[in-house]
Image (cartoon, rainbow, N blue to C red):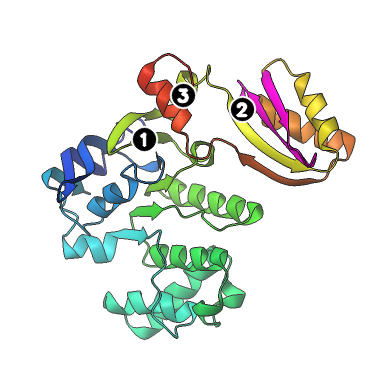
Amino acid sequence: MTGSSGARPVIVLDGVSRFYGDVLGISDVTLEIGPGITGLVGPNGSGKTTLMNLVTGLIRPSDGSVRVLGHPPDDPELLMRRLGYCAQVDAFPPGLTGIGFVMRYLLAAGLGRSRARDLALRAISRVGLAEACGRRVAGYSKGMRQRIKLAQAIAHDPDVLILDEPLNGLDPLARAEILGLFRDLAAENRTLLISSHILHEVDIVSDAVVLMNDGFVVAEGAVRDMREELTTHPLQVLVRCSRAPRLAARLLELEDVVEVRIHPDRAGFVVASRDADALHLALERIVVDDGVEIETILPADEDIQAIYNYLVSGSGEAG
């Protein structure tokens, strides 16, 4: 079971398949997800959104069963009171302000206007958007739209949060803040299922990870166990910074760094390392010691297809 060890499962999928005509969404998925943060990782088209739509009751399985908190997910009481959902796709009614958007769903759930406003303001404050909540959502940046969708998902204080690519469009500082919020929500004994196409992004915050590809679950388990499985697959990181050649040369001195490729514009490079933690610690140390100005640090294997090939083949070779 993924999630907190020994805890009773909150989300249960038993032999679940979903087809769209002749097209496979997910196939024969059996999962038990407990309290804490579970990362759902896979490239676009792997089945992540289909699985999340099944858990939220937006679609029904072709085969198998889904239970959330012991109930079918299309139970209105569960959907309106105990489950929060942040969709990947933007769908904002025209003309609404940020606070109006969040209040709209609270009012639809039957809350009075005063209570809905209090809950909306609290949620908006938690996502760091209080100063902009009176502005129209149509004028928000992509990152602000992500934050207001997250505020809507948490405003009614749900026990279970289903968050589909919630970090898209956020700058590095905003990502760090929202990841901190996820940890706080999990510490309040909630269950968070967070999807991403970037393994490292959910690795740093999740208690467990589920890897999907082509509608199937490729692997699942505690993050520490997953990391041990991937030790022979070097992590690739893209770095753009001042004095890139010097930083790249310093990193090549590390025992676990297996390759560094300088970008043609000499303002960045890709570094591959067998030890992700050691690489990030070394980057921090060298940046401080040498006075390097960092523009970007991003995973270079964003679609993690090489990791899937590694796990499926068992050969440790990226294909």
Q: 10 Å neighbourhood of mark 3: few (<14), some, or many (≥20)? A: few
The residue drawn where x is 50% and y is 68% is 145
Left or right of residue 52: residue 127:
right
Foreground label between 3 and 2: 3
Q: Answer with mark 3 or mark 1, whichever residue precedes in sequence.
A: 1
Q: Which residues are magenta?
A: 257-275
The residue identified by callout 1 is 210
Q: 10 Å neighbourhood of mark 2: few (<14), some, or many (≥20)? A: some
The residue drawn where x is 26% and y is 78% is 110
Q: Which label is found at residue 319?
A: 3
Residue 17 horizontal/vertical position (percent): 17, 42
Q: Answer with mark 3 or mark 2, whichever residue precedes in sequence.
A: 2
Under circle 2, the secondary element is helix
The residue drawn where x is 52% and y is 82% is 136
Front position in the image: 173 or 303: 303
Main secondary-structure element of the magenta-colored stretch? strand
Residue 41 horizontal/vertical position (percent): 41, 40
Front position in the image: 309 or 35: 309
Q: CA distance from mark 3 to mark 1?
A: 21 Å
